[in-house]
Image (spheres, rainbow, N blue to C red):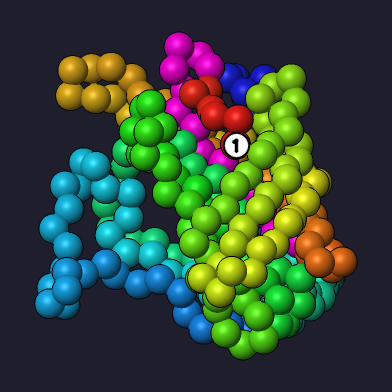
Amino acid sequence: MSQNRWQIQKVLLKTTQSLPCAVDLSWTGVSPMFGGKPTYEDGTELIQDSTKSFAKAHYEQHGKMEGTFSGGQKTFSINGFGLRDKSWGARYWQSINWYRWLPMIFSEDFAMMLSIISRDEQSNSVKASGMVLEGNEYKIITNCTVESQWNEHGYQTGMECWAVTTEGTEYNISGEVISLIPLRNRRKSPDGTELQTRITEAMTRYQCNGQVGMGMSEYLDQIIQGKTNRSSQ
C-alpha cells in the first residue's frame, strides 16, 4: 500500500456494523516509576522554549496486564508484560534530530529500556541512557549502543544492542522486528518550510542473558529531501 495516498471506500463505512464492546483490564506495576518532571537543584521547574520542547515531563514503568476485552460475541483474553509511559507538555517532533527508544521486558524481575537521543543535526551531541530492572529495583544505564539492520525501505528489521549500568554490569541484547507501522508528523516552520518527521513503531522480540522477551523499537528520524537522516544506529 502506498504511504503517500490511501483510499477508503465509502461503502465500507456505510456497511460497517456497530457492535457492543466492553473492556476489563488490570495493570500492575512490577517496577518503580522512572522519570518525572525535570527541575533545577532548588526544586523549581525548568524553563523551556516550547518550540524546542519534546516533553515537559515523562515517566515510564514496566508492568503486567491481565483481563479481557470483547466486541460483539467475541471475547479476547490478555495476560502479558509490557511498559506504560506518559509524556505531557508541548511537543514538537522536529525538535530532535533522531532517537532510538527500546523498551523490553523478559519477566517480572528482568526488563529494561534503552534510549539514544541526538538533538543536533550533526549528531555531535548524543545522549545514551535507560534503566535495567533486576529484581524489584531499577539499575541506571550510563551508556548504551544500538546497531540496526534495515530493509530496502529504510525500516529497522533487527538490532544488536549493548548497555552498561552504574554498577558496571554489561548487557548484550539482540532484537528482531516482528511487525512495523510507519507514522508521520508534519509541521511548517515560520518561514513556510514544510518539516516532516517519521516515527516507526515496531513490535520487537528481544533476547538477553538466555531469556526471550517482547517490546518495541521506536525510531524517530527527520525526513530531509525525501530521505531519512538516520544514523547507523
At x 36%, y 39%, the residue is 125
- Is residue 24 something that shows in the picture? no
Task: Say whether residue 14 is left or right of residue 157.
Answer: left
Q: Secondary structure at mark 1?
A: loop
Give the percent coordinates (x, y) of residue 149. Answer: 73, 33
Task: Give the percent coordinates (x, y) of residue 42.
Answer: 12, 77
Residue 174 in the image: above or below residue 79: above
- The dominant secondary structure in magenta is strand
Decide: is 233 above or below 60.
Answer: above
Residue sitting at x 59%, y 47%: 145
Quadrant (top left, top right, bottom left, bottom right) of the N terminus: top right
The quarter of the displayed image where residue 74 is located: bottom right
What is the magenta range?
Answer: 214-227
Q: Is residue 2 visible?
A: yes
Type of amino acid under label 1? Gln
- In the displayed structure, does residue 103 sit left or right of residue 49? right
- At a point 68% along the width and 37% down the height, the residue shown is 148
Residue 20: x and y in percent read 69, 69
Q: Which residue is mark 1?
A: 233
Q: Quadrant of the C terminus?
A: top right
